Amino acid sequence: TGKHWGYGKDDGPSIWHQNFPVAEGDRQSPIDIMPQQASHDPNLGPIVLNYDHCTSLNICNNGHSVVVEFDDTDDRSVILGGPLDNPYRLKQFHFHWGGKGCHGSEHTVEGNSYASELHLVHWNAVKYRSFGEAASAPDGLAVLGIFLETGDDHRWLHTITDALYMVKYKASVTDFKGFNPKCLLPSSLHYWTYLGSLTTPPLHESVTWIVLKEPIAVSERQLGKFRMLLFTGEEEDQRIRMENNFRPPQPLKGRKNLQ
Ligand SMILES: NS(=O)(=O)c1c2ccccc2cc2ccccc12
Ligand SMILES: [Zn+2]
């Protein structure tokens, strides 16, 4: 009996606090990143992505985004280093995007948003026995955020966009094996990091955010394919295009983002 929520006028981010009061908490995400205000922490090392043996399983439309899920039964694909005290296992990645020509990223940089944002979701399997348990612990999750800007075609994104027609409707899922998200990384792993939350209900304040400074380029044509997805299920009369599935930046409430 999960409470209904969405990105529309009547069920969108401005009313989430009614069913999820933590929406007005002290470490909510996303935020507007101000690089000048970010304090440099010399103890912060580079992040390391050990994705070489990662195993993608399927791609699904969960009614809020398109999600690629991974086998997280062992430490075959982990993120470590940077602000993290343990390796965190890759569980899934998904995207947020806008409408035609307008912006769709969740984090912004000095008030500027990007066309889209990719989130790679990881959980702390050293301290917690399941993803669900980690998802509500303050150091349970680590999400790597990558900005997408419009430019040339992305050489490898077609592997994902070619599969989107198979998951057009909410709750549709299809096999999606052999995809390694390393091909979606920019050339630099320089990052900002801060303590935040899920950007979707239940908005648990359990995420260490690691946002890469360098965006990747994707074409308007490739982004357009995400907009053929629907928020609605095959059996519903209404067909609502999946777009603008992003939460706007939330108050910093005294947080410093580090770099
Ligand atoms: N935008 S998000 O990364 O906060 C997010 C999750 C974050 C942590 C754990 C699970 C999450 C599941 C999501 C599902 C759809 C969209 C964002 C999601
Ligand atoms: Zn996300």
Image: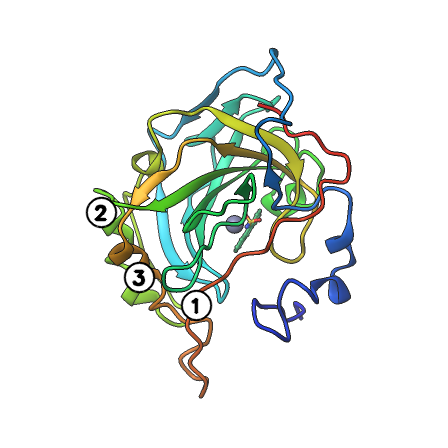
Q: Position of residue 4 (x, y in %)?
A: 63, 71
Secondary structure beneath label 1:
loop
Q: Earlier in the sequence, mark 1 or mark 3?
A: 3
Query: Of the residues shown, which amino acid type is indicated by label 1?
Result: Met
Q: Which residue corresponds to mark 2? A: 153
The foreground one among 49 and 199 is 199
Quadrant of the rendered image containing residue 118? top left
Q: Is label 3 within 8 A of ligand 2 (CB to nearest ligand atom)?
A: no
Q: Which residue corresponds to mark 3? A: 224
Residue drawn at 33 percent across, 38 percent down: 184
Numbered tag placed on residue 124 in the rendering: none
Image position of 182 with respect to 202: above or below: above
Secondary structure beneath label 2:
loop
Q: Earlier in the sequence, mark 1 or mark 2?
A: 2
Q: Nearer the viewer, mark 1 or mark 2?
A: 2
Q: Position of residue 76 (x, y in %)?
A: 41, 31
Image position of 18 with respect to 54: above or below: below
Q: Is label 2 within 8 A of ligand 2 (CB to nearest ligand atom)?
A: no
Tell whether 13 sits left or right of 70.
right
Q: Earlier in the sequence, mark 3 or mark 2?
A: 2
User: If the image is split into quadrants, where does the N terminus sit?
Assistant: bottom right
